[in-house]
Image (spheres, rainbow, N blue to C red):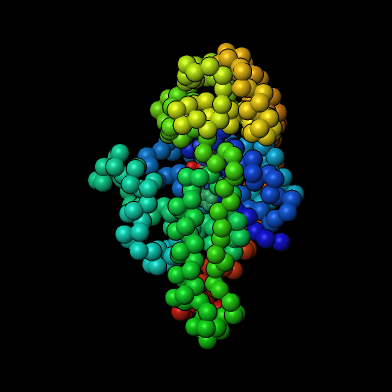
């Protein structure tokens, strides 16, 4: 079976962007692929964070994976920091990562510009190397993510190719390694709809965990009345009727897409159903569709979180399975890079 890996940071709460851009697609992949879904807690500490919240948020994110339909009979679910190989391989990969290449990454530029060079840790710069390590350790074929991770995936592919070239192939074989590449070169899987869910208060900005206003996003754990209120207050326009793909109407396009994703209908069906609707009517239809989609997730979430030992066991088993694969890759890389290994 081909392999799929992906993860979400345990920062803030998981929102519709994370769900439609990533998690929902994981669920549809788990039947046909060998899947590994992790909670990237080590990535969540690159900007200032609350130490009292990290463990809680990590468990909550894991529980949400399951509530969204990740099935532990099929998928391995684990916490990134529980598999030590992630940080170890990152160090090895960092020696093959050009500094300038990291400095040009969009997310680094945006975040470091906001905080100022003196105020951000170097982990913000090396963050994509850890992400590459998360992926390459598992000899991954596909990585289902939202649009914003595309650049990180490109870097991951480059690092895989570079390390394969520098240390793999014939050189590695001479050192006693098996033939073939050290790393598989992975591909991003970006969904046709949902890859970029936009903010409810600005149709040109991405829905994000870090936006200051909670009204800009719908969190998977928002109560019904909060969802209704956020939709009621979300930004609209003064055109008549509703339509996709009008560049002057980014909010309209975004809300219709969210409706499409929540109902599972096609774009044509949604365009046809909503073309003559007023904003008032559409908002109530959208609210109902979202609640209908999200409510069952919330019910399952309550069940899962009320059984702490169950979740602990899932994460322990997941980390065990992951570690055995990750360690094998890591050992190969050490060997290929010429390290003196203990017997
Ligand atoms: P994170 O935690 O920011 O986001 C998790 C996933 O949600 C997607 N996403 C969105 N998709 C559509 N619309 C949006 N508005 C939106 N916002 C977020 C992201 O694309 C992502 O798929 N660096 C990663 C986590 C990571 C990772 C990995 C992912 C670390 N290691 C290895 C895959 C494989 C991140 O910060 O995602």
Toward the viewer: 343 or 59? 59
What residue do we see at 30% from left, 39% from top?
A: 114
Residue 289 visible in this rendered orientation of the protein: no
On the image, the x and y values in percent for residue 135 come to: 54, 58
Extreme residue toward the top, this view = 280
What residue do we see at 34% from left, 42% from top?
A: 111
Residue 167 visible in this rendered orientation of the protein: yes
| Quarter of the rendering containing residue 180 | bottom right
On the image, the x and y values in percent for residue 297 come to: 67, 31
Residue 248 vs residue 301: left or right? left
| Quarter of the rendering containing residue 95 | bottom left
Toward the viewer: 340 or 279? 279
On the image, the x and y values in percent for residue 204 come to: 43, 32
What residue do we see at 64% from left, 19% from top?
A: 285
Extreme residue toward the left, this view = 118
Q: Is residue 233 above or below residue 296?
A: above
What residue do we see at 46% from left, 64% from top?
A: 158
Number of on-image labels: 0
Residue 72 vs residue 133: left or right? right
Toward the viewer: 121 or 316? 121
On the image, the x and y values in percent for residue 243 come to: 56, 26
Residue 104 vs residue 238: left or right? left
Q: Is residue 54 above or below residue 92?
A: above
Placement of the N terminus among the 4 image quadrants: bottom right
Placement of the C terminus among the 4 image quadrants: bottom right
| Quarter of the rendering containing residue 295 | top right
């Amino acid at each position: 079976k081909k392999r799929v890996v992906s993860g979400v940071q345990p920062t803030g709460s998981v929102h519709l962007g994370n769900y439609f851009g990533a998690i929902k697609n994981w669920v549809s992949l788990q039947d046909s692929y060998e899947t590994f879904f992790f909670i990237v807690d080590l990535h969540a500490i690159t900007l200032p964070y609350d130490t009292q919240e990290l463990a809680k948020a990590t468990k909550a994110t894991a529980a949400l994976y399951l509530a969204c339909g990740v099935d532990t009979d099929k998928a391995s679910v684990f916490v990134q920091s529980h598999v030590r190989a992630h940080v170890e391989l990152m160090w090895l990969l960092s020696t093959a990562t050009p500094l300038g290449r990291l400095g040009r990454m969009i997310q680094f530029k945006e975040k470091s510009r906001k905080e100022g060079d003196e105020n951000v840790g170097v982990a913000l710069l090396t963050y994509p190397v850890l992400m590459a390590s998360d992926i390459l350790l598992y000899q991954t074929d596909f990585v289902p993510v939202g649009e914003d991770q595309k650049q990180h995936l490109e870097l991951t592919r480059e690092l895989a190719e570079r390390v394969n070239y520098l240390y793999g192939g014939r050189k590695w074989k001479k050192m006693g390694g098996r033939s073939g590449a050290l790393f598989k070169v992975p591909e991003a899987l970006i969904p046709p709809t949902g890859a970029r869910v936009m903010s409810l208060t600005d149709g040109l900005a991405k829905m994000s965990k870090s936006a200051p206003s909670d009204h800009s996003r719908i969190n998977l754990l928002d109560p019904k009345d909060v969802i209704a209120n956020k939709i009621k207050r979300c930004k609209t326009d003064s055109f008549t009727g509703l339509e996709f793909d009008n560049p002057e109407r980014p909010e309209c396009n975004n809300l219709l897409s969210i409706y499409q994703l929540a109902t599972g209908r096609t774009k044509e069906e949604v365009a046809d159903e909503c073309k003559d609707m007023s904003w008032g009517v559409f908002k109530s239809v959208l609210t109902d569709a979202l609640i209908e989609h999200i409510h069952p997730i919330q019910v399952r979430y309550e069940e899962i979180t009320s059984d702490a030992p169950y979740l602990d066991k899932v994460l322990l088993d997941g980390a065990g399975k992951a570690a055995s694969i990750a360690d094998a890759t890591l050992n190969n890389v050490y060997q290929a890079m010429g390290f003196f290994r203990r017997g």
